Amino acid sequence: MKALRRAYEPLFRNVLYPLYESGLMRRGTLRYLAEYERNQWLPAERIQALQWEKLQTLIAHCWERVPFYRDHWGRAGMSDPAEIRSLQDYARLPVLTKRDLREDFERLKADGYCDRLLYKTTGGSTGEPVTIGYTRESYERRTAVMLRGYGWAGAPLGRHVLFLWGHDPDGQSLKERLHHTAFNRRILNAYVMGEHNMAAYADAIDLDRPKTLVGYVSPLVRLAKWLDAHGRRVHAPETLICAAEPLYPHHRALLERVFGCRVHNTYGCREVMLIASECDACEGLHVNADHLHVELGDPVYDTGHAVPREVLITDLHNYGMPLMRYANGDIATEKHGNCACGRGLPLLASVDGRRMDALRTPEGHFVGEFLEFLVFATPGIVRFQAAQHSIETIEVTLVRGDGFEASSLEILRERFRETCGDSTRLNFHFADDIALTPTGKLRVAISTLSCSAATALTHAFEWIARSGIEPVVMGVV
């Protein structure tokens, strides 16, 4: 069996997949993959120039053929695409929001492309599901970029991979089952994970013995905590890839210790697929700047040492329904400097979550990651979720396990007060479990505060003004 698996990976990558993708399906995925494989080693300046060339062409196309952008940019004072002479000029154009996508869906389609678009709808875990259209070329390029990024992280084409994912394998069609089998991957359903069946997930890993384990952060962390608490050791994959949720340093340390392998982080969204991924150096997430234009726009809050900003995305190859400066709702932090791997692609230091889920104090301090660290550093807590509906109070729901002590809550309150002050209080509640989102993820933090009205943001923006911070264009600063 081992010999068969070793032989299958190169056979699939070099023979079977090219026959299927390029021959049978007549898609350009592998041609685009070869292009992106070459691009990644270009100097940063050349990648920036390539990106700007693509963006200029797309801006002119949008002005000429997309009714929404002619009006959207025209209201902002633009009268000719030639006015956009640099990325800094582009960064002054108005942002595209989810509300725009819902309300102006038809006017966002380019003239002549309406009957040639493919469509997908986001999961809507934040309460804002949207449908987007995209071209066949855009889909093929997205697939190529995904293959490149997962290859960096240890899951090249044909690699035997086990997914802990928000997907029900029992609901798959025969076509889907054959597809996953051909790609040498198996899926475990993260939807149904609970304390009663954790051993079954551990057994599945031992039975399948994957080279690479891929999953959402929260179920991987939950499984790692269970394994650690029960002294269970499972088959160690060569690498573990995290996706779909923020990966914090204490998560990475736990996963590497329990699973005994290197952990890689990835970042994507359903609207454009893979945005960034870590390579073997793990010095940050390489942004796919030869495929997307990613900006880090307005600062969302002040952490005191780094400034998470709103993520704005432009898909450089979707000419059918272009997403120009699209705010997908995420926040991230830039990393300056170059990666030791030698790739010229810019870096993100971290992906910090959803803008709407930023917990904060009246002074403008972000408390989400710190609160998570405090809670999970407390013995006997299996899972938690923090919800903020007023600036003065954070409601914390806890799922207790072995080793929990009531006195731990007072210790948590005191440590939180010492760091964040007396202006925000923690209220604790207990539950048997915490439901996952419809896409199988755990929302650790939920905020229903109005970003425009919250006192916290007022203070944060005052700090920003004092600091003289300007929006960041990835790969330029």
Image (tube, rainbow, N blue to C red):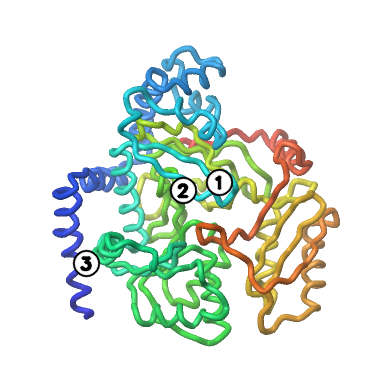
Query: Can you tell which mark lies on residue 330?
Result: 1
> Residue at position x 14%, y 49% from top?
23
Quadrant of the frame with the N terminus: bottom left
Earlier along the polypeptide chain: callout 2 or callout 3? 3
Which residue corresponds to mark 3?
A: 9
> Residue at position x 46%, y 16% from top?
83
Asked if residue 228 can be seen in this view, the reply is: yes
The answer to whether 269 is drawn above or below residue 280 in the figure is: above
**Residue 351 location in percent, x, y?**
53, 52
**Residue 88 location in percent, x, y?**
50, 27
Of residues 252 and 404, which is closer to you in this image?
404
In the picture, measured across the screen, residue 313 lies left or right of residue 29, that is: right
Local SS, label 1: strand
Marks 2 and 3, how far apart at CA: 27 Å
Earlier along the polypeptide chain: callout 1 or callout 3? 3
Marks 2 and 1, how far apart at CA: 9 Å
Considering every residue shown, the one lying at the far right of the view is 422
Of residues 296 and 204, which is closer to you in this image?
204
Assess disc 2: are there few (<14), some (14-19) or many (≥20) residues with their C-alpha within 10 Å of its C-alpha.
Answer: some
> Residue at position x 49%, y 56% from top?
244
Marks 2 and 3: CB-CB under 8 Å? no
Marks 1 and 3, how far apart at CA: 35 Å
**Residue 84 location in percent, x, y?**
45, 20
Local SS, label 3: helix
In the picture, measured across the screen, residue 224 lies left or right of residue 402, that is: left
Which residue corresponds to mark 2?
A: 269
> Residue at position x 45%, y 45% from top?
121
